[in-house]
Amino acid sequence: MVLNISLTLLMLNGLKIFMSKIRIALITNYPSYHQIDLFNEIAKLPEVDFNAIYLRKITIDRNWKKTKNIYHKHVFLKEINSRSHFYFNKGILSELSRIKPHIIIVTQYASITMQLILYYRLFINTPVVFWSERPFVEHTEVPIFNSNILRKVFRRIALLPLHWVD
């Protein structure tokens, strides 16, 4: 996990010729206690302007007792819920417009908001990094679709914009 972000920062290091700091927008569904320390450390790097955009405070199926202090720049977007797993964050594009990131990192693909970002990347000149587990990994969480066939079909559709090359 740290290695992937470090490699991405090294690749972007060439951009420093043209700018003083690399602006990163990380979009993730909620602040997980095991990632907050990592994000706090990345935000301390002098060459990085790190901004986390959290889509939720916590998901319904998480019962974590631990919390960590968030010291990095972050925002919690308001969400519109239709069901526990179906939600949308209407402020995402305005938040990205405010940050003006040089790179966008997304950590999942299933939410409507993440889908919007994956398609939005086709119209902007900002690289989007997909930073998550590999697709089709089996989860023990309660699935949105009970049918494995439906889940695989919808995952393929959800990941389509990642395969389109500019």
Image (tube, grey):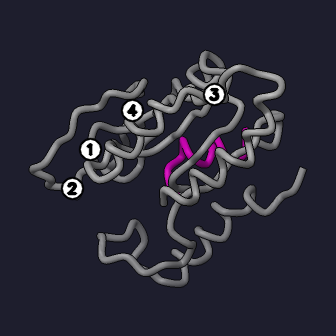
Q: Position of residue 1 (x, y in %)?
A: 48, 60
Give the labeled residue for mark 3. 23
**SS class of the residue under badge 1?**
loop
Query: What are the residue bounds of the magenta stretch?
Result: 110-120
| Corner quadrant of residue 41 | top left
Give the labeled residue for mark 1. 58
Q: Mark 4 or 3 closer to N-term?
A: 3
Q: Amino acid at mark 1?
A: Ile
Left or right position of 158 against 125: left
Left or right position of 156 against 33: right
Q: Mark 3 or 2 closer to N-term?
A: 3
Disc number placed over residue 62 in the picture, else none? 2
Mark 3 or mark 2: which is in front? 3
Does the stretch in magenta take in 25?
Answer: no
Mark 1 is surrounded, within 10 Å at the Cα level, by few (under 14), some (14 to 19) or many (20 or more) other residues, namely: some
**SS class of the residue under badge 3?**
strand
